[in-house]
Image (cartoon, grey):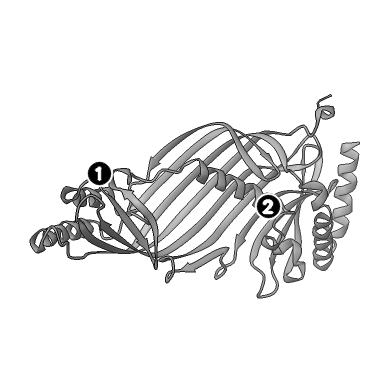
Amino acid sequence: MAKIYYLISLLFICGWQLSAQNTNIRALQLVEMAKEKLDKNYEFNQVNFDFIYQENKDELIDELQIEIKKHSELGAQATKQLQRKVEKLIDKEPSLTNQYKTLTQGKASITNKKLQFNDFTKKVKGGDSIGFISPTTPIYEILTEQLDKDDTYQLKSGMFTCQENANLNQCNNYTANTENLKLDIEEGLEDSNLTSRKFAYDFLYQTNNYDYSIKSIKELDSTAIAEIEFNPKKENASYTGSMHIDLKTQAIVKLNYRLLPGHTTASFNAKFLLGFKTVTTELDKTIVYQKLANGKYFPAHLIIYKTKKLWGNRTIKLKGNKSNNRLKLEFTKGSKEKIKQEMLFNQATPMAQSSSDLK
């Protein structure tokens, strides 16, 4: 039956392709059918899965300026020496590149959009560049030559003191913690659920802004799959790319799309109040879905490329609570991060809703 269905589907689609205009009309009809089936196909609030998460991040520092104000206790001569040491450090590496990589794998479950790790192991490489909030470890070492390491200080960002009692001994190199990993995976899953963030997929929900065409018909596991390309037709379209649609279920089983030049996926500007602003641009995203035992589709493989530009200034007011140390260090940073995130979700199975589901 599957082969007969496939042949009928193939002949049916080939009949559509008698003209370019017909192809475009039928492609749009398939997209509309897939959109109508989204609620049926992509609800995956309760699922167990194994995961592999890898992130590669290259950070280019375009601008870095550090200024040390007068230190009343060190005196003018010591302050000048400290200033020269910091300037010498910056002059050696005026434009730094940092490569940061994480590889994490384990077991997890998602229930009502809340992610829970059952177990995981993580490997981290790199991460030695100048951090956004704190200077490099070498700069801290220079500062702590003169200051009491057991003392505590204030960190000010923009108009507000954003961290109180920051002990210098606790300012280690940045490594991604469990919360950062959790947020990345939750965001990836949320973004892959085509019913949960409709505003993010204007090529599905604003089809009048796009042109669609059937590029090919393929067979995958005895199922006919149509590959449909979409390109902007109007200026307010945001993406270009392709989608693969199962002709039997009208489920989108694969998406590959790119953000058009000049568009951004997220931006935040709070330089005056908080001391920084960011702009994130998505370059390319691929999502492959797998069908679960309950008939729902779950993302099996995500690959995301994006850039993140950041501009910020920080003021570290070193006002010791044990002594009269007073030192003010200000620095401005402009950087661009190139990020690749890859997530694999294997052996995904729906979670039992009740004891009767286990029978």
Residue 51, picture quadrant: top right
Of 277 and 35, nearer the camera is 277
Placement of 224 over or under 14, stated as above or below = above
Query: Can I make out residue 55 in this image?
Result: yes
Q: Nearer the observer, disc 1 or disc 2?
A: 1
- Residue 240's spot in the image, x, y percent? 65, 63
- Residue 7 as seen in the image, left or right of residue 210: right
Labels 1 and 2: the sequence-earlier one:
1
Q: Quadrant of residue 32?
A: bottom right
Q: Which residue in the rendered view is the most extreme toward the top?
A: 359
Whole-number angstrom distance, CA of label 1 to CA of label 2? 53 Å
Residue tagged 1: 150
Q: Position of residue 180 (x, y in %)?
A: 51, 46
| Location of residue 154 by image quarter | bottom left
Q: Classify 176 as above or below 17.
A: above
Report how many numbered discs are placed on residues in the image.
2
Q: Amino acid at mark 2?
A: Leu
| Closest to the observer, 64 or 271 | 271
Residue at the image position 25 percent from the left and 53 percent from the top? 320
> Which class describes the residues within 10 Å of circle 1: few (<14), some (14-19), or many (20+)?
some
Which quadrant does the N terminus fall into? top right
Q: Which residue is mark 2?
A: 255
Disc 1 marks a residue whose amino acid type is Asp
Along the viewing direction, whichever of 311 and 56 lies nearer the viewer: 311
Q: Is residue 313 above or below residue 137?
A: below
Left or right, 268 with respect to 38, comes to left
- Assign a secondary structure to mark 2: strand
- x, y percentage for residue 8? 90, 46
Q: Residue at x 51, y 62 (%)?
A: 280
